[in-house]
Each structure stands twice: as C-alpha cells, then as structure tokens.
Amino acid sequence: MLRAATGLLASALLALAAPVGAEAAPLRTVYTISLIGLPVGRAEFRTTIDARRFKVEGTLSSAGLAELVSSTRGTSSVSGRIAGRRLLADRYALAYTSDGKSWSSDLSLRSGSVVSSKVAPPARNPAPADFVPVRRAQLTSVVDPLSGLMIAPEKPADLCRRTLNVYDGWSRIDLPLSPAGTERVRTDGFDGEAVVCTTTVRPVGGYRTSSNGLRFLRGKVIRLWFAPIGDTGVYAPVRVRIPTEVGPLSLAASTFAKP
C-alpha cells in the first residue's frame, strides 16, 4: 500500500496546470523532491493546452543521496478535453523502473469514468486474503493522478472544499481537501499568496489491510500549496508536504509554469 498510496499521491501532487483558453504553447514546471530536507529526486512537466484540449508529459528521477540506495526513473502523461471548468482526461499513462523492476499503467477514460485499465505486472491471482479490490462502481467520477489537481474553482475560497477520487490503475483513494489559509510563496514563475489545503489519504480499493504503509498513512495530514496560473483562474500545486515513515517528503517547484 505504501507504493500504491504514497507513489500515487506523489504522482498526483506533481500535476501541472496551464491557462484555460490560452494559445497552445508549452509550459514548464520543475519540482525538487526532498526527504527530511535532503534532495532525493527531480520531476519536470511540460503542458500544452488550448480552449478545447490539454496534454501533460512528465519525467521523474531519483537524485542525490537516493541514487546511492535506489535508482528510479519514470514517465507519465495525460491528455484530454476541456469542458467549462473541468479538465476531463481521455488517456493516462505511467511507466517507471526502480532497482531493475518495472511497473506500468494505461488508462482510458470518458467523462470521469474508467473505460479500460491495463497494468503490468498484472494483479496476483488469486489475490491475497486481505486484499480489498476496486469495484466497478468505484471507477466513476474519478480523476487521474496528473490532471486531478488542475483545479479551476469558482473562487479561490472554494478550491479546498472538494474531495478528489483518484485512480491510477492499481488503487482508488479519496483525498478530501480542507482549507488551511494562505501563505506567501516565491519561486521562478510565481510570487504571491498560495492557497493552502490539507488532506488525508482514504483508501477505497486496491490495497491490503495488513499493509504497514497503510497503517502509517491513516490519519496523517498532508499539506498542499496551490498557486494561481496568471489570471486564468486555474490553480496547481506549487508545494507539497507528505509524511513518510522516515520523515517528511517535500515537493517544491523551483520553476512554476513558465514558457
């Protein structure tokens, strides 16, 4: 569950937003990933978007001291259409390797519902006795880990008043956002008040009840800082803080949505 929840959450929180209705031009966001203050990874995302379609492509790699323990490389992408204030994914894909082992996920979606899902390696059959499966009814009104946090609220105060139902092909988790004020954030591409949300991981399906990772994450508070993209009304994470068993995992944008 630690991979399914922490990995899924980290992927979701690295999402990048871009101006709805703008000309299709790539925007770049770079995140530094730190564990207990030490650099352990880097993620970069490029987004293109126009009035009707969007596409996000990203890479993630371990760095610094993490390379001495475990080497990780991955890519992720999502594409879809824009309907009002909603970004509706059509296709989501993730592929990564860690210490010679590989995982991949390929989802097709339509209007927030999963049409097809393929993961590798395939799920164990038979499943462990304590495994909680994802039911078909739980694959409607979901978001993928990349575009799920590209949010365009009616007003900033509404940004944290929602629950995100995230599915990555393996696990379905709910992230109920709650408002936690604002905080000044400065980075290359943004300097201003960020909207702060808190959340907790609520597992729905695709996990084992005996998982130590699940037991650790249950009830732990995660903090997200959302920054507006110009005057478009679209917000995206500019900073994230996630508890882990060895200390806080932090994601901070060194470059935020710049051409």
Image: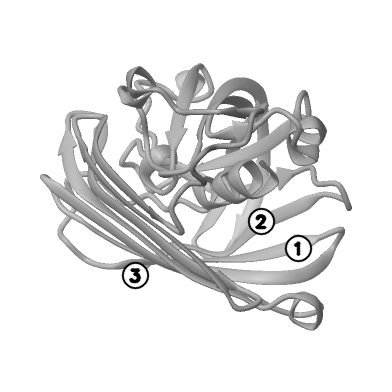
Q: Earlier in the sequence, mark 3 or mark 2?
A: 2
Q: Are marks 3 and 2 in contact (CB under 8 Å)?
A: no
| Colour mapping used in the image | one colour
Q: Are marks 3 and 1 in contact (CB under 8 Å)?
A: no
| Mark 3 → mark 2, Cα distance in angstroms | 21 Å
Label 3 crowd bin: few (<14), some (14–19), many (20+), radius 10 Å: few
Pick the front one: 105 or 39: 105
170 lies above or below 7: above
Q: Is residue 189 above or below residue 217?
A: below
Badge 2 marks a residue whose secondary structure is: strand
Furthest residue to the front? 126
Task: Tell me what residue is drawn at x 85 percent, y 62 percent.
Answer: 37
Residue matched to label 2: 251
Q: Which mark is residue 259?
A: 3
- The reply to whether discs 2 and 1 touch (Cβ–Cβ < 8 Å) is yes
Label 2 sits on what residue type?
Leu
Between marks 3 and 1 in the image, the one whose residue lies nearer the viewer: 1
Badge 1 local density, few (<14 within 10 Å), some, or many (20+)? many
Residue 118 to residue 151: above or below? below
Whole-percent x, y for residue 22 in the image: 19, 52
Task: Determine the residue located farthest toward the left in the rendered image.
Answer: 52
* Residue 214 drawn at (x, y percent): 73, 34
Give the mark nearer the N terminus: 3 vs 1.
1
Residue 110 left/right relative to 214: left
Image side of residue 249 versus residue 176, left or right? right
Which percent across, then down, holds residue 112? 26, 29
Q: CA distance from mark 3 to mark 1?
A: 25 Å
Residue appearing at x 80%, y 83% in the figure = 68
Q: Which residue is mark 1?
A: 34
- State which quadrant residue 67 falls in: bottom right
Res. 213 image quadrant = top right
Marked residue nearer the N-terminal end (2 or 1): 1
